[in-house]
Image (spheres, helix red, strand yellow):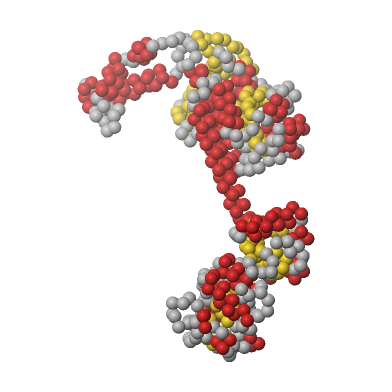
Amino acid sequence: MTGPEGATARGEDDAEELAVLAIGEDDRLAGIDAAVENLDDDAVEGIDPLRGDCLLLAIDDPDRLAGLLDRLADVPVPSVVAPREGSEQLATVALRGGATEYVPSGESLDDRLRRAAAAGTDGRFHEAIVTALPDEAFVIDEDGTYLEATIGPDAGDLRTVPADELVGTTIDEAFPPEDAAEFRACIEAVLESGERRTIEYDLETTAGSRQYEARVVPIDGTHRRATLWLARDVTERAERERELRRRRDQLETFDGVNRVISRIIRTLVEAPTRADVERTVCDGLVESELYCGAWIGEPDGDGGLLVRARAGEARTLLDHVGSDAFEPAPVVGRVLETDRVRTTTQLPTEPKAPAAVRRAAAADDVTAASIVPLIHDGTRYGVLVAYARREDAFSDRERSALRTLGETVGFAINATLNRRLLFADSVVELELRVAGGDSLSFHLTDRYDCRCRHEWIGEAGSGRTYQYVVVDGLDGETVDREARAHPSVADHRIVDDGPDRTTIEVRFRESGVERLTGHGATVRGVTVEDGVAEFRAEVPRDADVRSVVEALQSVYDDAVLVARREVDRPVRTARERRDRIVERLTDRQLTALRLAYYGGYFDWPRGSTGEEIAETMEVSAPTMHQHLRRALRELSAAFFEPEEN
């Protein structure tokens, strides 16, 4: 025999996986140096159950454990089964064989010995078995009657009926009819098949509804057929699993949304017209089955919306949107004003939605809606509205993806409008007039005797739009001072500072030129004099001129259309364009340009220096650079400046 640190007692055969040990009140070990086969009453002499001594059986083989418990049936000594590797089968064998306790594995042998001694001697179900496997353990016979019941201390606080009051009752008395019928069917199946089954169920407790998982195994050898019902509270685990499933579903949904939007964006590149862009977006969203409806609308100038495209199976909603009775909710206007995506997940009861929309949503079983602004470079082309029936619709990630789609649609609409104008053989020229505007140009011409001419507007690499304005009759210092103080200017830089002429690079907070460009117009010229601006712009022949005028009126209330005329564009070949450019160059300028090009002056690294080209021309280097710069200026002017018809 050894002490507690290595407390093992084996039979004469060291290979026998068996230890039969006893522990007294003073923690001293007493052992039995006898094989299992020879275990009898004499072998346990000196062990006093009244003192709390007990036998501990460290056996992992179910058959051996069953045989030993059968031999110990008449021995008046508490027996504790403490295997190294526990299992439900061992627990069942221990219970059926009359063991006093079943101690869980995973503890040191010394800890198991002390735990066994403290476990007590009365009853077949005690703390050990409850701690080892279930929160609740029951023996239920084939009629559904509780024969025995043990509930752990933590689980006991949740039970509305104490364990001792369950014994003798039936599952029909303890559970609602539907649950009781399911449990009886499970017990019957276990007894018929002889195989273990697992069942999950909800139980009303003092802490509310809790979720349990029970493992039901058959018990043989009793006077009637019965099952062992081992139940564990899995509420927290179930909640974790539900949260993981929710996150997984959200991720799958978001991946699906991204795939749909990516596919739509790729398709937009090939859309030839604005109508094709809008139809592609609506069809693509509903074909994904993530959305049950989608439509695109733009302001009609009278406070309403013109629905340009729609698609989906939410017919009641979509038919209402396309009807004369449709009135957009005020939130649509706020989306256009703020460029923010707005969503609701309770559309049938959304107080901010019109009553007709709420009724239509309820009829179509639509629960969620998202309103997405269609914008590009500050120009608003309308809104995209998407409907969904999903409970997880329009998460933060999905809203972000839809905003990206809205920006891309705005860009695509802008591109189609400009593409139509670029390749048109004939265009409509518009003349518009604005009196009393509040931008810097109006202010300068009102206050000083000067004239402002907008040379060019374009987007820089940062995404910001800049304009180049030539101010005739005013010095650069004054223009700079006025630009710094004027509220319409977000940023500016003096490019050319002369006594009577100044060129300023300026970024306006809001610009009528930008609005015209955003609606597919090409601005050919803007002049401001005496506080009155004259705009000259070109649009395609089939363009909606009214929407172009309204775009300018969104910045200047008093903008009016003065004239509208159709203009044919002359078609010139590449040779004709080249000849026109050559005609604008002097012989020296053309020579400098040719020598620089063929001599590799524009390559990197350079094939020729300026001095080498000057030497070839037999002129000084400053003279050569002067000819070359003027030639490049003419080339740039031929490319950037509008041609006179």
User: Which quadrant holds residue 39?
Assistant: bottom right
Residue drawn at x 59%, y 49% is 245
Residue drawn at x 60%, y 36% is 290
On the picture, is 537 further left or further right than 171? left
User: Which quadrant holds residue 298?
Assistant: top right
Is 154 rendered above or below residue 404?
A: below
Instruction: Give the mark count.
Output: 0
Residue drawn at x 44%, y 80% is 13
Residue, far bottom: 46
Is 311 rendered above or below residue 537?
A: below
Q: Residue 369 at x, y = what percent?
A: 66, 36
**437 vs 635, nearest the viewer:** 635
Is 382 rendered above or below residue 209?
A: above
Determine if residue 526 is in view.
Answer: no
Is 370 rendered above or below residue 250?
A: above
**518 vs 342, nearest the viewer:** 342
Q: Residue 29 at x, y = what percent?
A: 54, 87
**288 vs 167, nearest the viewer:** 167
Q: Residue 70 at x, y = what percent?
A: 59, 76
Residue drawn at x 65%, y 60% is 191
Determine if residue 563 is in view.
Answer: yes
Q: Residue 74 at x, y = what percent?
A: 63, 81
